[in-house]
Image (tube, grey):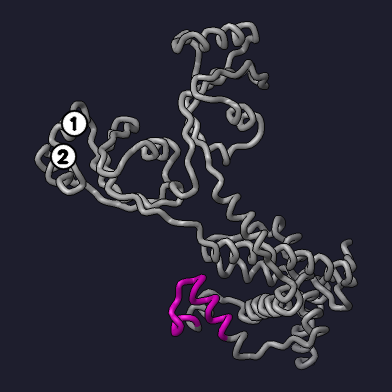
Amino acid sequence: MHKTLILILIMLPLRLLATEIEIIADVNGEPISNLDIERRINFINSLLGNQSVNREEVKPQILRQLIDEIIIVSEAQRLNIKLSDEELNNAVTLFLTQSLKLKSDEVDLYIKKHNIDLNTLKKQIKCQLLWNKIIEVGVVPLINISDQEVNDARKQKEKPDYLITFQEFVIPDQKMAEDLVKKLRTSNNPEPSIKMRKATVNLSQLKGTLKDVLERLEISDVAGPISLSEGYSVIKVIDKVQLDHTLLESILKVKQVVVKDSENLLSNFKEQKVSCLNFDKLADDFKLPSAKEFKVKMRDLNPDLQILFSKTSVNEIVEFRENSTAKLMMLCDIKSNAVDIEAIKQEMYQQKIMIQSNLLLDNMRKNAAVSYRFN
């Protein structure tokens, strides 16, 4: 009797667990259950630490991922692509050390401490490695980049860009907007009560109506009224600067001092015949904060600074006001960067591999026998 009771206690949880398993999908005869999905969610949460994913939101995404993994493994088997234990173990260690910023001898302890499902991790990484090998066999040999493609891409990169500073007025009434257009074309002083925003934008990064309007305007041109949901827009261009690719890719060497009150400072620096050699000393003589020196790519500056430096010569000092502070900046050097043809080729190569890989995976999905068994 005692042995029978123990047997019942052992079997009962197994039966309860069995009743909870549901087959969600079948891929090429291999089932995916709700427990597979839960196991993958638990694995993700173990990597996130204190954070966690929304289980219901990620379930469809994880199901698609599990389906793709079975499809990829099947394709690798069909192509007789193999993966050694050493390759897999090295990839797992690399993933853990890089993504979690661990040292090699800390990996095992971390896995135990955070209860990471190593089998799930290995399965996921194995699939990625097999997919990389499938791409090497089925995609990479087909990739070809012609000299004409590279030349066209180079010309596209070298196209000049425009920075435009403009004022925009939003008027609720069409007649008032039309009157404002007439006034702006003859005067720079609209009614003070009319709300206005001023902005500097990069034309290549714009889309839609605003880009179409600004593209055809020159300095002092006025456009509108443009119908909006909240009224009518009137736009006036204040400044328009063309920047060539070489300048945008250039590295600027700048010395800078930030002050709260810059009144007369700029003219004082100029009177002292400021240069990059004596900028630090003059800043110290004027009892200003210590000057800082930095290098920055022209493209990484905000549009207002791009406009300012596009009109600045080497060894020239300029002022840039921002809220309650002013920056006195000395342009010390401009280092040009020519278009890197090899970098263009590599970028195109990666883009083509990505496009063809996605097409290959889509085709593999179409050829797989996938059935869903939702209740």
**Disc 2: which residue:** 288
Q: Which residues are magenta?
A: 90-107
The reply to whether residue 299 is visible in this rendering is no
Res. 79 visible in picture: yes
In the rendered image, which residue does mark 1 sit on?
265
Mark 1 falls on what kind of element? Answer: helix
Question: In the displayed structure, would residue 190 be above or below residue 291?
Answer: above
Q: Amino acid at mark 2?
A: Leu
Is 93 contained in the magenta span?
yes
Q: Main secondary structure of the magenta part?
A: helix
Does 193 sit above or below residue 74? above
Quadrant housing the N terminus = bottom right
Q: Relative to 62, is 306 on the left or the right?
A: left
Identify the residue at horizontal 59%, vertical 31% (top origin).
Answer: 215
Closest to the observer: 321 or 121?
A: 321
The mark lying in front, picked from 2 and 1, is: 1
Q: Position of residue 319 (x, y in %)?
A: 29, 34
